[in-house]
């Protein structure tokens, strides 16, 4: 089954936007934790995850350029919102920063899973394999966050639900705008 160019563009645009936002979240968290003593462990974890997210973003930059796909017009919004979310959760403490990662990666795991199936069904196994690898890395981020006590964050159920809802909304908006 062939996928329309429009659908492919939407999928790549939203993935690019998501990775752009993830990089911004980690920048916000690192901006807080790098300035505070005693947070070397989480700082190292965040730097490693940010590095992987940057590699994902770089891959999507290339895919957008090669496929002549325009990025979302909301990149400046996602940059500011991501940084603010990262900084705010870091200011609430390490558990809240991990809760943010867990919530975001839960949504992204589902999203990439759906996209892998869609790309495979359309015969684009190369892109499906790339997204599958990215998905595995996002799952590892989620599992690390859970192991580090994400569920112990203050107001975890509400915080997690708000972040997951925001991510799902950003996905829908970024597909079109």
Image: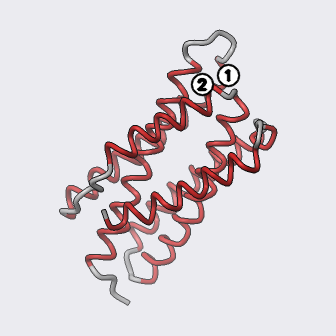
SS at mark 2?
helix
Q: Secondary structure at mark 1?
A: helix
Which image quadrant for residue 66? Answer: bottom left
On the image, which quarter does residue 172 sit in?
bottom left
Decide: is 145 above or below 39. below
At which x and y percent is residue 86?
54, 34
Q: Residue furthest right?
A: 152
Q: Residue at x 36, y 45 (%)?
A: 77
Q: Pointer 2: residues within 10 angstroms few (<14), some, or many (20+)? A: some
Q: Which mark is residue 41?
A: 1
Q: Position of residue 105 (x, y in %)?
A: 60, 52
Q: Report the residue marked by disc 2.
A: 44
Q: Residue furthest bottom?
A: 1
Q: Position of residue 35 (x, y in %)?
A: 55, 13
The residue lying toward the viewer, choosing from 48 and 96, is 96
Q: Nearer the viewer, residue 9 or 124?
A: 9
Please tell me which residue lies in front, 52 or 22: 22
The C terminus - image quarter: bottom left
- Give the x, y percent position of residue 108: 55, 58
Please name the residue shown 32% across and 42% down the image: 76
Mark 2–mark 1 CB contact (< 8 Å): yes
Compare residues 24 and 121 and report the one nearer the observer: 24
């Amino acid at each position: 089954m062939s996928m329309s160019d429009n659908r492919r563009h939407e999928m790549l645009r939203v993935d690019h936007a998501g990775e752009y936002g993830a990089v911004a979240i980690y920048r916000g968290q690192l901006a807080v934790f790098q300035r505070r003593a005693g947070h070397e462990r989480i700082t190292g974890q965040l730097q490693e995850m940010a590095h992987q997210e940057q590699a994902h973003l770089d891959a999507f930059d290339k895919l957008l350029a090669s496929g002549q796909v325009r990025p979302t017009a909301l990149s400046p919004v996602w940059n500011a919102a991501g940084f603010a979310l990262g900084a705010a959760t870091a200011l609430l403490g390490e558990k809240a920063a991990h809760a943010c990662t867990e919530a975001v990666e839960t949504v992204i795991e589902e999203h990439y899973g759906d996209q892998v199936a869609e790309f495979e069904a359309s015969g684009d196994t190369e892109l499906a394999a790339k997204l599958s690898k990215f998905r595995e890395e996002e799952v590892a981020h989620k599992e690390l966050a859970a192991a580090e006590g994400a569920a112990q964050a203050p107001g975890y159920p509400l915080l997690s639900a708000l972040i997951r809802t925001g991510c799902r909304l950003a996905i829908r908006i970024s597909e079109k705008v």
